[in-house]
Image (spheres, rainbow, N blue to C red):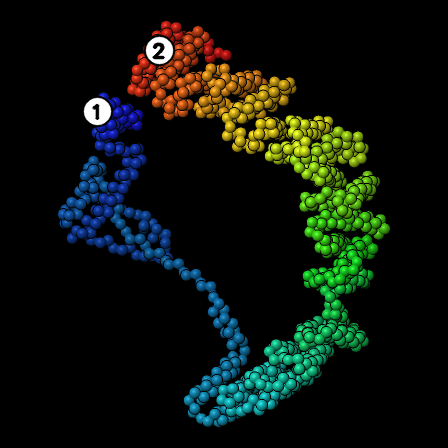
Amino acid sequence: MRWVTAIVGGMTGFVLALASDWSIGSTVAIMAGLGFWLGNVLFAGSQGEEPSAAFTGTAPSASLAARVKHLEDRVAMLSEEVERLRQESPHYLAPPEPPVEVELPAEVRSHDQVRPPVTATLPPAPVPLASAEAEPETSHEQQAAPLAVSQPESPPSLPAKPAAPATPDLLEHAFNAARDWLLGGNTVVRVGIIVLFFGVAFLLKYAASNSLLPIEFRLAGTALGAAVLLGAGWHLRERRTVYGLVLQGGGVGVLYLTVFAAVKLVALIPSGMALPLMVVICALSAFLAIRQDAAVLAFMGSAGGFLAPVLVSSGGGSHVALFSYYALLNAGIFAIAWFKAWRALNLLGFSFTFVIGSIWGATAYAPEHFASTEAFLLLFFLMYVGISLLYALRRECVVRHYVDGSLVFGTPIAATALQAALVKSMPFGLAWSAVALSAFYLLAAAGLVRWRQRLGLLFDAMLVLGVIFATLAIPFACSGQTTGAAWAIEGAALVWMAVRQRRLLALLSGLLMQLVAALAFLASWGEPPGAVLMPVVHTGFLAMLMIALAGLFIGWWLQVRSDAGRWQAWLPDVGMAAAVWGLCWWAAAGLREIQAHAATLAPEALVPFMLPALVLWAILTAWLAHAARRLLAWPLARRVEQALAPVLGLLTLGLFMTQAAPLTGWGWLAWPLALVSTYAILWHLEGEHERGQTSPWPPYALQHLLSFWMLCALLAFEGYWRLREFVPEGAWSWSAWACGVGLCLLAVSTLGTRLRWPVAVQAWSYQVWGAAPLALLLWVWSIGSALSDGDASPLFWLPLLNPLDVAQLLGFLAVAAWIGRLRQLEVSQPPPEVNYLAFATVFLWFNAMLLRVLHHYFGVEYEVSAVLASFRWQQVFMLGWGVFAFAALWLVRSERLQKLCVLASLPLMLVLWLWTINVNLTEAGGDWMRLPLLNPLDAVLLAIYALIAFWLARLASLTGLLAPYRTALLSAVGATAFLWLNAMLLRTLHHWTGLPYTLADISHSTLAQAALTVFWALCALTTQVIATRRGLRMLWFVGGALLGVTVIKLFLFDLSRIQGLERIVAFIGVGVLLLLVGYFSPLPPKRAAAEEVTP
């Protein structure tokens, strides 16, 4: 209501401004505001509000609940004010605080819930300002009852929640670990020894910093204290064993620290003298350890001994002296190992010896040091092999862990690594070293044969190490390719022996050797193959062949020729994996060999050579698998035969990369042999399948499908390249694609039914799934052919009798035959979208053919832009589209196809209609436009309108879809006819008077405006007369509306712009027409209008 009155007010203001020459903007704004205010008043009055409320804008309470909420808020505010005033009063007595009973929360809750009422009888306010502030708030509630205000109470104190215990962090964990160690036994002595060490260190530092005593006395005192600790510990070794060992260990540590300080900190003694002192300390700790059976003392002494050269070294010593010293220490460890099986001490000596030796080798080794260094390396190797043997002998009574794996296997690994660095510049040096190590370990294993019952694990370790070094000798002496082949054969032999002897570890080792062999070969993949005198007779190919045959042998042995499945149920699956592994290496060997020989050819001959060679290799593989299945009774080989069709199908894709016909070069042998082999193997396999001997994978239907596609691809590619070689110009080669594919589709849909095998047996594979991609390819080709001008050089171009149109018609025929065959096979019909797509494809081909006619006979460029730029050729295409649509609507007799054509023509009709609208608005026509209707443009427009009317009639009769849109369609028809008639009038004026056919010129032309006014009135008269005669009330209103528009145009436009005779003619003509309308076409009665609605 408010906005309606505002709009009415604004319109009133606009009229007043025009009538009184006021400001339009201000007048409209004022009147619109008054209208909005009046609407607001009326709307408020309609809702039952008081006028005062409507004017003041105060909204009444929406509901009773809102009023109650408002009163409750006021009461709470007044209660707070009353309490504040009472506290300010001099007669106010504070209530006693209730006792806090933490242990009785129920009483506290009950006490808190009881709130006695307080009468709101207020004493005189001592502060006038407060009452003055409270008065406005209480004036609105004078009729309210006296308020009962509850006395506020302080909330009871609640007991605090206990804090959650903190989670210990990393520092707390470290502290707890240190505390547990310190208090875990002998706490006092542990603390004492720690404090003693710190004290000695601080004493030495302080003495060195302050020079309190001569340095000799200080170091002598420290050494004396260490001797005291050793003596006390030795004295207490029997009564307080642990205590005595701790004192002795501390004494040894202080002695090492004293010697280190004398050498490094104060340079009191030379390095050459310090080393023997540390040797003596080391020997002393070893003696004490053996005598008391204390491994800790031996460990501390040996560690100090090994660190002594590092600590006192000045960087210029001899490596012979260093390694001699280490040999002496290791001899001590060896002597200890003769009596004691202390594993930690053994590992300590091993680690220090080889780590420090490696560091020296990396930083100071030179080739001239080889003789002395090799001797020490051999000595250390023999020592620790002996130590590992002594450890096993000392612990042979233990059932488990009597072999120290760290030394047994770590010693040869470390020694081999250092030996490799020493002999890296010697030919075959590492290979001979591996042979020597292999012989040594095999001899050690032979020496342990008689103790095999007691030391079986040690015997196996020695034997395995001997075999390993014998295996490693191969790659050290040979190339990676030869190594891989040898290891693969060795692994296969190991698997064969392991299955016969039921040794699982040997089986796993043999399988692992297959992977190691592959890695060894791949490591040398980039190496040049060398001189290849003959194909396949060289190291690279033979090595890959050996790896492949090893994998295939393992697969066959684990699946067929042994009872491996009864031993381990999973071994047949391992055999399948090994067979696949071997097959992959077989395929890779062939591919690498073909690629190696193809690299010697010219680049343009590379792919034509490789593709047939790969096809021949695949055929050879399939026939070898066929022979293996029959001779070796290996069912798994059947899978390789069944894979021939998929593999050849993939290789067929390589035809897209070739630049020659498939039968070029070795293709004449490869591809026919591929087809023969594929169908021959399928014949054998299907026969076995019928006898129930196999279940194929992939299914035979898929194999037939791939074989058929391969045949079609070969025919299409061969036809394309041969025709291109024969007729390189024009569209001949492009047409060959459709001819090859179309002939295949036509043959399989018609003649193929006569072949009992394979087409009749696999009808769906060939005539449904196999033919569907061919139809799709023909459709794609048809879309792509629209881009070609269809040049038939060296022949001249004729419509329908050129290579492109012949191929297109062949494709249409093949697709139609295929659809008929689908109906015979009772295949479900395609969705309607496919039918519409086929209609669009035919329409596209018709447009392309029409444009080719213009291109070859009238010199029009074969471009869509050339047609769009010429109105002349647009008319040709519109007539062509009309002929195409009329033929589709008139010639088709099947009701289903008629409906399809009618619905598919909907976009075409819409485009034609929009084109007529654009032409009527923008095109003036040619020189033949002087007479209406008797000119080419109007004839084309009339033909299009007749076609649209015919299409609408067919659409209404077939589908009944137009009934809900009858009024809209009639309106569109009337508007289109009115626009066409106006355009016809203006084009006539343009050609007879020279009036430019543009909107600006027409709007400023008095002749055109007068003609339009009279013409509109004449159209309105005609419309109303027809409406009166037929009793069409709605049509009469349309004519009346047009007449009203004409009158408005006459007074608002023609009156101010048209002068002279034109204005006279316009007004008189319109007036006469109005009189005629009033006389001849009165408004039809409503009864006639009701009959108009009835169809």
Horizontal side of residue 677 vs 527, given as left or right: right
The foreground one among 150 and 641 is 641
Q: What residue does disc 1 label?
A: 21
Kind of element beneath mark 1:
loop
State how far apart marks 1 and 2 are (Cα). Answer: 34 Å
Front-lying residue, 904 or 305: 904
Taking the spot 63% from the left edge, 22% from the top edge, the residue there is 897
Q: Please, is residue 971 above or below residue 59 in the view?
A: above
Q: Nearer the viewer, residue 349 or 865?
A: 865
Q: Earlier in the sequence, mark 1 or mark 2?
A: 1
The residue identified by callout 2 is 1069
The residue lying at 47 percent from left, 66 percent from top is: 169
**Placement of 310 over or under 498, stated as above or below:** below
Residue 806 image-quadrant placement? top right
Image quadrant holding the N terminus, namely: top left
Q: Residue at x 14, y 49 (%)?
A: 126
